[in-house]
Image: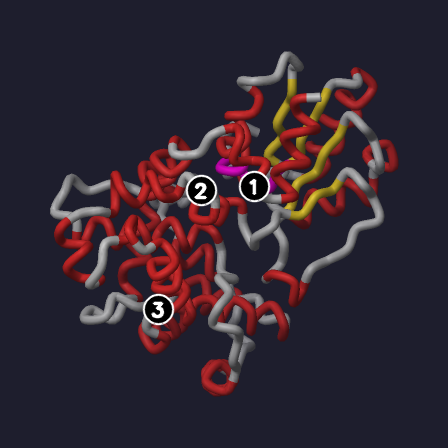
Amino acid sequence: MSNKRPDKIDINYLKALLDMLIPSKRKIILLEGSTDIDFLKILTDKSEKDILFIDANGKPNIEQLFIDITELQNNQYILGVVDKDFGDIFEKKYEWDNILQTDFTSIEYYYIYYSGFYSFAREILSKEGINKFLGFQPSLDLDRFKSFLHTSLKALTKLRVLCFKNGYHIPINNIFSTYKDKQRKFVDSNNRYKKFKNIFDPKLFILDVNLLLTNIRTSKEYTEKCSCLDFEKVKEEYNLFEIDESLILTNGHDLISYITCLYNKYSNSNTKGDRDIEEIMRCSITEEMFDEYECTKQIRQWILN
């Protein structure tokens, strides 16, 4: 298993692991990825329980594990946490009490909606270059800055929702991934922003749909996995498709990469990677903030009880 990328972990391995662990009645949390684990570790520091986090590598794996292993279902020692698909529009309902859906489309969005975001904006985003570009100071007008993020990410949001609705398997995440070697064994998530920044309008620093679609169309991943798609049809559907602009619906990694790009371009400070920015955002939250939203409140209660 050691030489496989995390996204190649076989679900049968996870099933065997859980079959071994379930009888121990040890508390186990199944999460979609490693950054989700990092997000929740602040709570385990406050718990006297030995809690095991398992990176199930995606929502489909978590859902399949609950379907196939009846011992997981409504088990008080097991908790599954999955991202909510595109807000209330496509929210799923689960029949088991021990699967929770995040209040936002990704765990990363708690960083900007928790009250601790003010501290992050004041310490990291309140740079002269950023203030000049935005025309205001983010920490003094958080709502305006969040609205700016909504607008900047709208192009990618629209494409992700359109693909979800129509079943287009465009590997957007793979297109933005970077790899440490030619064998493409390991995703270098800290440098994701380097490819992400290639889809910005250089003047407005807003994601440009034409640049985005061109990057997708010319990528190896698109050619291999989406060769049957009519690209012009996708573009036409995109131009006709509208979503609620008040919602951020895109992937949480997109949010982190965007803030990283914004910081690196306009702060005149040392360059930071995605994980650097995410770590600073994570350090701005406290245990008490988990009570600000329903899902994280339930997670906190489950961990600490």
Question: What x and y, as percent, mark residue 197?
Answer: 28, 59
Q: Nearer the viewer, residue 166 or 247?
A: 247
Amino acid, disc 2: Ser
Q: Quarter holding the N terminus?
A: top right
User: In the picture shown, does residue 76 fall above or below 246?
Assistant: above
Which stretch is magenta? Answer: 31-36
User: In this figure, which residue is indicated by the disc labeled 2?
Assistant: 115
Disc 1 or 3, which lies upstream in sequence? Answer: 3
| Element carrying mark 1 | helix
Amino acid, disc 3: Asn
Question: In this orientation, does residue 180 appear?
Answer: no
User: In the picture shown, does residue 94 fall above or below 54?
Assistant: below
Residue visible at 70% across and 28% down in the picture: 302
| Element carrying mark 2 | loop
Q: Nearer the viewer, residue 175 or 134?
A: 134
Q: Which mark is residue 255?
A: none
Cα–Cα span, label 1 and label 3: 38 Å
User: In this figure, which residue is indicated by the disc labeled 1?
Assistant: 292
Question: What x and y, as percent, mark residue 44?
Answer: 57, 21
Contact flag, marks 2 and 1 (Cβ < 8 Å): yes
Amino acid, disc 1: Glu
Cα–Cα span, label 2 and label 1: 8 Å
User: In this figure, which residue is indicated by the disc labeled 3?
Assistant: 215
233 drawn magenta: no
Question: What x and y, as percent, mark residue 80?
Answer: 70, 38
User: In the picture shown, does residue 75 fall above or below 59?
Assistant: above
Question: What x and y, as percent, mark residue 66?
Answer: 79, 41
